[in-house]
């Protein structure tokens, strides 16, 4: 009898090991396939880019080789790195302030009707005005230093986060709120244990959208009043007739946005997964 049980246990362990190996092999196959697809897509994109550069000439479209050479030139001179750090710092500070302020305001507007009635007209008015319209005023009010750029990034972020948070807060099931109230929770406890956790996916979504809009704003802000930054570098490229520098700036912005968004996704999915963030 003991031998039968032992044999059965060994068979189960063998089956589990085989299943684990099968899943691991399938995962590796999926990663390899995705990598090959990305590589193929990149190769096709570079091929089309090279053809267009050859067809229209270097004065209109810089080739990948010319852009790579320009990137090396800007990197060795220190211009590229200083531009990346300047723009990245402005984006992160303005975006962070927009999330920190927009999320609480959105929760309050979603749960307290009088707050929503008071603030909703301003939210709906200002969120349709593009940040570039305030560039001149930002320089006049806050000077040509870092504050004006950070304020513009904050402006473009805060309304997106606020609206997304309002939508997430309003969508909370009344059954959850009623159940918490029936268990004796007061309004503050309901806010902490039900409303805030249920709003986190909406806050994260708003934060990601705000990050994208921050990159749209930073170029216009730096073109008007900045000595460093990707936007300033692109404007200088125009003044010097360096179309290859312009391409470097555009590509760097795309890479920075991809990295920032990927980091945000990884952190939110790792630490906020229990709240439904994916």
Image (cartoon, rainbow, N blue to C red):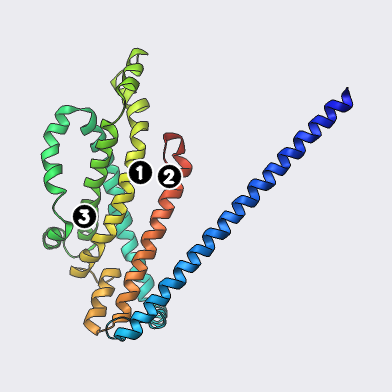
Secondary structure under tag 3 reads helix
- Identify the residue under disc 3: 151
- In this picture, is 68 found above or below 25? below
- In this picture, is 28 found above or below 72? above
Q: Nearer the viewer, mark 3 or mark 2?
A: 2
Secondary structure under tag 1 reads helix
Secondary structure under tag 2 reads helix
- Identify the residue under disc 1: 204
Give the camera-side residue of 2 and 172. 2
Q: Residue at x 32, y 39 (%)?
A: 202
Q: Residue at x 25, y 72 (%)?
A: 232
Q: Position of residue 14 (x, y in %)?
A: 77, 39
Answer left or right for 251 relative to 274: left
| Image quarter hosting the N terminus | top right
Precedes in sequence: disc 1 or disc 3: 3
Give the camera-side residue of 63 and 162. 63
- Identify the residue under disc 2: 268
- C-alpha distance separating marks 1 and 2: 7 Å
């Amino acid at each position: 009898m003991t031998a039968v049980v032992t044999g059965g246990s060994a068979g189960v362990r063998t089956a589990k090991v085989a299943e684990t190996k099968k899943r691991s092999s399938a995962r590796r196959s999926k990663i390899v396939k995705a990598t090959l697809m990305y590589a193929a897509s990149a190769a096709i994109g570079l091929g089309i880019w090279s053809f267009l550069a050859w067809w229209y000439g270097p004065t209109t479209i810089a080739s990948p080789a010319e852009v790579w050479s320009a990137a090396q030139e800007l990197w060795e001179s220190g211009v590229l790195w200083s531009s990346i750090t300047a723009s990245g710092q402005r984006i992160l500070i303005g975006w962070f302030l927009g999330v920190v302020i927009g999320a609480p305001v959105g929760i309050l507007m979603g749960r307290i009707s009088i707050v929503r009635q008071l603030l909703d007209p301003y939210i709906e008015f200002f969120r349709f005005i593009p940040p570039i319209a305030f560039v001149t005023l930002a320089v006049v009010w806050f000077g040509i230093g870092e504050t004006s750029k950070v304020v513009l990034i904050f402006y473009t972020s805060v309304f997106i986060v606020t609206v997304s948070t309002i939508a997430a807060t309003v969508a909370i099931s009344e059954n959850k709120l009623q159940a918490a109230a029936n268990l004796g929770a007061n309004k503050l406890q309901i806010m902490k244990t039900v409303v805030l956790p249920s709003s986190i996916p909406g806050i994260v979504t708003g934060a990601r959208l705000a990050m994208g809009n921050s990159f749209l704003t930073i170029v216009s802000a730096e073109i008007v009043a900045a000595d460093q930054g990707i936007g300033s570098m692109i404007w200088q490229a125009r003044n010097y007739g360096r179309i290859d520098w312009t391409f470097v700036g555009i590509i760097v912005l795309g890479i920075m946005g991809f990295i920032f968004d990927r980091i945000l996704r990884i952190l939110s999915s790792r630490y906020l997964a229990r709240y439904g963030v994916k």
